[in-house]
Image (spheres, rainbow, N blue to C red):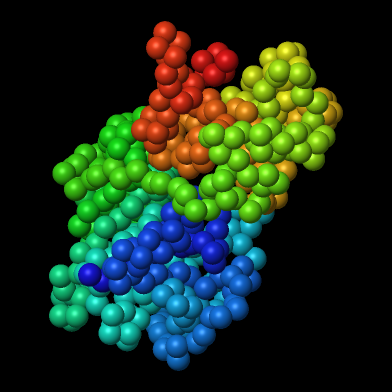
Amino acid sequence: MKVLIVSSEAVPYCKTGGLADVVGTLLRELNAAGIDAWLFLPFYSKVINKTGIEDTGLRYAETIKGKVFEGALLRHRKTYFVDAGYLFDRDGIYGDDSGDYHDNHLRYSFFCRAVIYFLKALNFRPDLIHLNDWQTALIPLYLRDRGLDDAFYRGIATVLTIHNLGYQGVFPAETIITLGIDKSLFNPEGIEYYGNVNFLKAGILFADFITTVSRKYADEITTAEYGFGLDGVLKKRKGAVFGILNGIDSSTWSPEHDRFILRNYSVGDLRGRAYCRFRLIRECKVEVRGGYPVFSFIGRIASQKGVDLILKILPWMMDRGLSLIVLGTGEAELEKGLKKFSSDYPGRIYIKNNFSEPFAHALYAGSDIVLMPSRYEPCGLVQMIALRYGAIPVARNTGGISDTVEDYDVFDDTGTGFLFDDFSASSLL
């Protein structure tokens, strides 16, 4: 079987979040299982380490609104990169400090068309193309159109994985002239979305199958509360929507063999964990009273992740002598709020804004309780990693958290974490 994975990011090349971990690991595991799997990525020339990457010599060019755009195909093992010059030659992947890049519609639509072209140029005809999020969601539509005139593209199945429905690739109506899409599709039954173009909606409509990253989230996105305006179209395609739970790379996230933590440990011998906790407290210079747990938050500092709830309970935590260690970056106002508490309570709150893989491992190995008060959580890897390292998740009962954390039952003394239902500070407490 031949499979093509198309994504906007993947480890070890480029990463902004969990999507990269899932895609990079999936490529490896599919090939290990005997499937001939290839991966296509944009070539972010200022982000990706160029070591070992070679030029295939293949080129793609097209004219958009009178301007010629060219793409070169690069390769490293079974990963192929579309190098589109200035479209991807930027400091960030999706945007910079001022926000998303204004031409993301152009960047990723060109990428999608180039992928389809290069498949034939490479004579690689996959049985299945696996797409990930809005950045790749135009491919089923392009594939359908190309298949009308070229038998090479006919019969290739497509599956679109929605990692987070909150990000849809919505752009002004006038951008449709740059997408190479028939204008007749710009209607409520097509890719139109409240007067705009919606990339993800195109994928939902034209992909053969749609998957989400947990069973619970597959149900949630068909409701008005979690559907972000696409619950109607998802309901229409309900029979093609499936929830497949993400997993973690157990070779990377292994307290027994983790090369990033100072002492390894196991379920049968937790002495190494106690040492990791001691060193974490010392490194972060936080005050932890005897017998009190070390709290942590790991992830995007965003309202989706419930950081606003954490801000609301911080006075309660500070009054009781508790401490919090934060690893992540995100929304400016929420970062500002956390930093204000850190300033007001020195030695009680430690914030590390620049993501560090070694520190993430140290934080899982050294903290006692990991906070995950998410508004919604399609899957979530943090709670799975926390459980692997012996940290207890305190999390909202939503999405993939519901599928992976068993709420503690005080009567039976069973469970793997503490869950709450209502999105409120009082429920979190």
Residue at 21% of width from left, 50% of height from top? 189
Please tell me which residue lies in front, 333 or 406: 406
Q: Quadrant of the N terminus?
A: bottom left
Residue at 22% of width from left, 53% of height from top? 209
Q: Position of residue 49 (x, y in %)?
A: 61, 72
Asked if residue 299 can be seen in this view, the reply is no
Asked if residue 18 can be seen in this view, the reply is yes
Eyeballing the image, is 254 above or below 146?
above
Q: Position of residue 200 (x, y in %)?
A: 35, 53
Eyeballing the image, is 417 above or below 268?
above
Q: Residue furthest top?
A: 411
Q: Position of residue 270 (x, y in %)?
A: 61, 33
Q: Residue furthest bottom?
A: 57
Quarter assignment of residue 58: bottom left
Q: Residue furthest front?
A: 268
Please tell me which residue lies in front, 101 or 16: 16
Residue at 63% of width from left, 57% of height from top? 96
Please tell me which residue lies in front, 331 or 282: 282
Residue at 19% of width from left, 48% of height from top? 240
Eyeballing the image, is 254 above or below 317?
below
Q: Is residue 190 left or right of residue 99?
A: left
Q: Quadrant of the C terminus?
A: top right
